[in-house]
């Protein structure tokens, strides 16, 4: 900033006020970064064209964009940082385009890369959780099918045993019907299996 007899000039005071105001607005915009990540990232980017204090908020908005939206939007906004940084270099009398690009672009790339990593990790964990839930549901279905099959097998066996016993009862009853002249001891011996 230019100094004139120990006091700040009007232009440098104005630039400081613009810088602080834009930085505060960028920080306020961060409240909506999850709901409108692209819009907030672009607002912070535009505010960063006139403010160095908006840069941290812009980096946070860029990382949040990378977490909440697909890579295409993140790459586009990250590439827009180049003209934004160059515009700031033209606006600021104390910086040059190369030094600003060398300082800010690695930070922007790191913020977008970190956000993409977090997004990919979340998607992987969600996929693994869904896969585990599907496997658990398949296991429960398999167990239920096994229980139904076992019940069906037991019911068939019981049906076969019951049918065999009823056939024996009918056979003994037919024998009694065919021989009504049997002595009481033989009738009792023939009816014992029917009673059993």
Image (cartoon, rainbow, N blue to C red):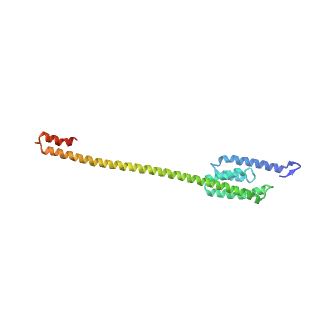
Residue farthest right in this picture: 5
Pick the front one: 171 or 50: 171
Position in image of residue 46 (x %, y %): 71, 53
Position in image of residue 66 (x %, y %): 63, 54
Occupied quadrant, residue 87:
bottom right
Position in image of residue 32 (x %, y %): 65, 47
Image quadrant in which the C terminus is located: top left
Q: Is residue 148 left or right of residue 171?
A: right
Residue farthest bottom in this picture: 98
Whether 184 is drawn above or below 110: the answer is above
Pick the front one: 107 or 7: 107
Q: Residue at x 27, y 49 (%)?
A: 160
Pick the front one: 145 or 61: 145
Q: Is residue 173 left or right of residue 68?
A: left
Position in image of residue 41 (x %, y %): 67, 52
Q: Residue at x 53, y 53 (%)?
A: 128
Residue farthest left in this picture: 181
Q: Residue at x 70, y 57 (%)?
A: 106
Q: How many numbered marks have been drawn onto this rendered protein structure?
A: 0
Whether 120 is drawn above or below 165: the answer is below
Q: Residue at x 59, y 53 (%)?
A: 121
């Amino acid at each position: 900033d230019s100094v004139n007899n120990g006091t700040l000039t009007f232009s440098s005071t104005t630039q400081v006020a613009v810088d602080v105001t834009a930085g505060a607005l960028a920080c306020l915009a961060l409240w909506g970064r999850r709901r409108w990540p692209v819009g907030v990232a672009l607002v912070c980017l535009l505010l960063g064209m006139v403010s160095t204090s908006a840069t941290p908020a812009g980096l946070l908005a860029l990382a949040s964009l990378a977490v909440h939206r697909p890579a295409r939007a993140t790459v586009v906004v990250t590439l827009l940082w180049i003209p934004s940084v160059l515009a700031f270099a033209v606006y600021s009398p104390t910086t040059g385009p190369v030094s600003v690009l060398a300082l800010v672009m690695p930070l922007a790339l790191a913020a977008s890369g970190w956000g993409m990593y977090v997004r990919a990790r979340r998607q992987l964990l969600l996929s693994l959780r869904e896969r585990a839930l599907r496997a658990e549901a398949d296991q429960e279905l398999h167990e239920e099918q096994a229980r139904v099959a076992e019940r069906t097998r037991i019911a068939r066996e019981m049906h076969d045993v019951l049918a065999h016993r009823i056939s024996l009862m009918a056979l003994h009853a037919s024998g009694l019907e065919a021989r009504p002249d049997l002595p009481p001891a033989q009738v009792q011996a023939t009816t014992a299996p029917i009673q059993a």
